[in-house]
Image (cartoon, rainbow, N blue to C red):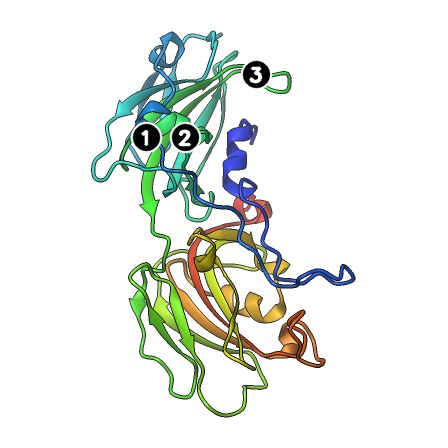
Amino acid sequence: MRLRPIVALSAAAVSVLLLAGCAGSGGDASPTASGSASAAVDLCDARAASGDASKAVSVSGDFGSPGTATFTAPLEVPALQSTVITEGSGTPLKAGDFVSYAMTAYDAQTGEKLGEVGYNPAELLPQQVSADSPLGQIFGCGAPGERVVATFPATQSAAGQVYVIDLLSTVPTAAWGEPQTPTDGLPTVALADSGAPTITLPGGDAPTETTLETLKKGDGYTVQSGDTVLVQYTGVRWSDGKTFDSTWDKGGVPTNFTTTGVVAGFQKALEGQTVGSQVLVVIPPKDGYGEGEINDKDLKGDTLVFVVDILGAQKTPAQSQGQ
């Protein structure tokens, strides 16, 4: 599929979160959040203007399925332009929102269809919208249900392209699944209005094996090995109950990483779970950062407790191509 760099919005726009530790680096082995929400900006002013190029494209097909674009090629595209085909409904976007979207791409020079992505589960990771992001410049303060034609000028590495892009939904920044009955003897979790968890440890010894509990059961895609996931998380030490890292403490902005790029216990908490779920996992040192003396400098030797909200997932390229 020869889609323009806008596809990079899906997989690589947010820095990878490394839960795997910093072996040999001497650095902090705990995870760090990937970024912070953009400052509050009126996205209505960020939308690219409609122009002759985007207006020249006719679109057929229903919202939520690949759109068919018709235009006379070659289409001259002097700048990014955005024309609304179908108005959305509901709450307008604001800076910092995460959205799911889908798109179909065409070569502006030849009219050839280049590909489509996002119309099947887990093909694109939800992305954060800001005034200086491509999605912010395409949708502005549009609402879910909006379909847009966006035209991109040629670059040194790519011909001009035409996109039909559907704004499918906004994505909550906390798990939305059905609450499950908690298991006695495991840490308990209380949620703030924002969704931020407070973890209370039980008395007694820590489990010697990785222990999972689904606190909320989502109804979305089932995460597979190697997928990229969008999550919120909080981690505490079993030894003292103190939080050592949390996306909620860094502005409440979700982050992403691959399931195979984290410690074994965290990987077990992700794979096989459904998007929308909240998972509690207790990770002994052998599935975490290794055995050793518990200390304040790293997480070696400590049993860790995470609460993880799984907000989105994107399949590996091999999985997507196998559909």
Q: Which element is circle 1 on?
A: loop
Q: Residues within 10 Å of mark 1 (few under 14, many from 20)?
A: some
Q: Is residue 12 left or right of residue 196?
A: right
Of badges 3 and 1, nearer the viewer stands 1
Mark 2 and mark 1 residues within 8 Å of each other at the beta carbon: yes
Q: Where is residue 259, by image quadrant?
A: bottom right
Q: CA distance from mark 2 to mark 1?
A: 8 Å
Q: Is residue 65 visible?
A: no
- For residue 312, above or below residue 113: below
Q: Residues within 10 Å of mark 2 (few under 14, many from 20)?
A: many
Q: Which residue is mark 3?
A: 159
Q: Nearer the viewer, residue 93 or 164?
A: 93
Instruction: Give the percent coordinates (x, y) of residue 235.
Output: 51, 68
Q: Which residue is mark 2?
A: 131
Image mark for residue 42: 1
Mark 3 vs 1, N-terminal side: 1
Image mark for residue 191: none
- In the image, what residue type sits under mark 3? Ala
Q: Which element is circle 3 on?
A: loop
Q: CA distance from mark 3 to mark 1?
A: 31 Å
Mark 3 and mark 1 residues within 8 Å of each other at the beta carbon: no
- In the image, what residue type sits under mark 1? Asp
- In the image, what residue type sits under mark 2? Ala
Q: Nearer the viewer, residue 67 or 11?
A: 11
Instruction: Give the percent coordinates (x, y) of residue 173.
Output: 37, 53
